[in-house]
Amino acid sequence: MTGDAEPYFDDGRDGWWQNFMGAGLALDTDRYFFISSNVLGGCKGTTGPSSINPQTGKPYGSQFPNIVVQDIVKVQKALLDHLGISHLKAIIGGSFGGMQANQWAIDYPDFMDNIVNLCSSIYFSAEAIGFNHVMRQAVINDPNFNGGDYYEGTPPDQGLSIARMLGMLTYRTNLQLAKAFGRATKSDGSFWGDYFQVESYLSYQGKKFLERFDANSYLHLLRALDMYDPSLGYDNVKEALSRIKARYMLVSVTTDQLFKPIDLYKSKQLLEQSGVDLHFYEFPSDYGHDAFFSGL
């Protein structure tokens, strides 16, 4: 959700899918041409809340419209139309990208041969929506949020940092954190500050996030996750899913705490009941939700 259009580099830098993409790897750059774009509503290039509104000459801020996954997919389709591309071998997405891949298969069923949905369910769970609510409240209640119009002042860094720390706990697992930190303390830790090393790690991740992401974009994309409904524009979810013609790979991770295996299994049932040519895999991993980055 907070990634960008740079999954791979061939100059020594690390993209976010560097472990999977490249010559001779699973996503083989010697065999296929890959297209990756920034999402609508984000802050990495495609229009988002921090973009300049041509009508005002200022960032959209609070005036940026609410978006859903279907809007994001329409923008991606417009990009491919502009590039003159009429068919894809596969559409691959992890987490929020998996929802987009799923919607691609529904709205443009003849456009691709294969769908690969990694660590993402057809619907976001109530628990996951609850996590997102707490993260949003951390941002919205930051004194600097100003209803989303903070671009000419101080951004809501404290709220966004706290939100990111909570998010990190949903991406990791207890086993990961226990191996990395256990109950180890910092030699210079304060009682009410970063006393434990795991606390220091979370604080670091929260501060690091401020360097690359916009609070309004975070809010909009969290809400798009919550609101994802593949049946939007159709009579029901079965009608929507029955439109899928592509071969469909759905991948679950045993330790995923955000898109739990039970949620992926429910998605498997929905897809199978809708007649989708489905291939379901559940991978054992210690990496939790972020296994789709590095642990499959």
Image (cartoon, grey):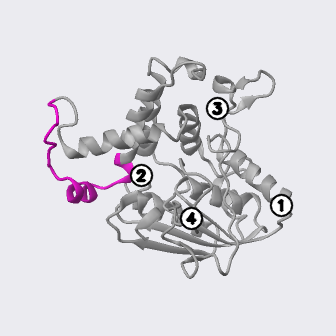
Q: What is the spatial separation of the Cα atoms under label 2 and label 1, in whole angstroms? A: 35 Å
Q: What is the spatial separation of the Cα atoms under label 4 and label 3, in whole angstroms? A: 29 Å
**Of the residues tagged 2 and 1, which is closer to the observer?**
1
Quadrant of the rendered structure where residue 35 is? bottom right
Q: Residue 166: image x %, image y %?
A: 36, 40
Q: Residue at x 64, y 32 (%)?
A: 50
Residue 57: tell me if it is visible: yes
* 279 lies left or right of 245: left
Q: Earlier in the sequence, mark 4 or mark 3?
A: 3
Considering only vertical position in the picture, is 169 above or below 117?
above
Q: Earlier in the sequence, mark 2 or mark 3?
A: 3
Indicate which disc residue 258 carries: 2
Q: Which residue is mark 3?
A: 50
Q: Is residue 157 magenta?
A: no
* 186 lies left or right of 144: left
* Whether label 1 touches label 4, CB < 8 Å: no
Where are the magenta residues, as a range? 169-191
Q: Amino acid at mark 2?
A: Leu
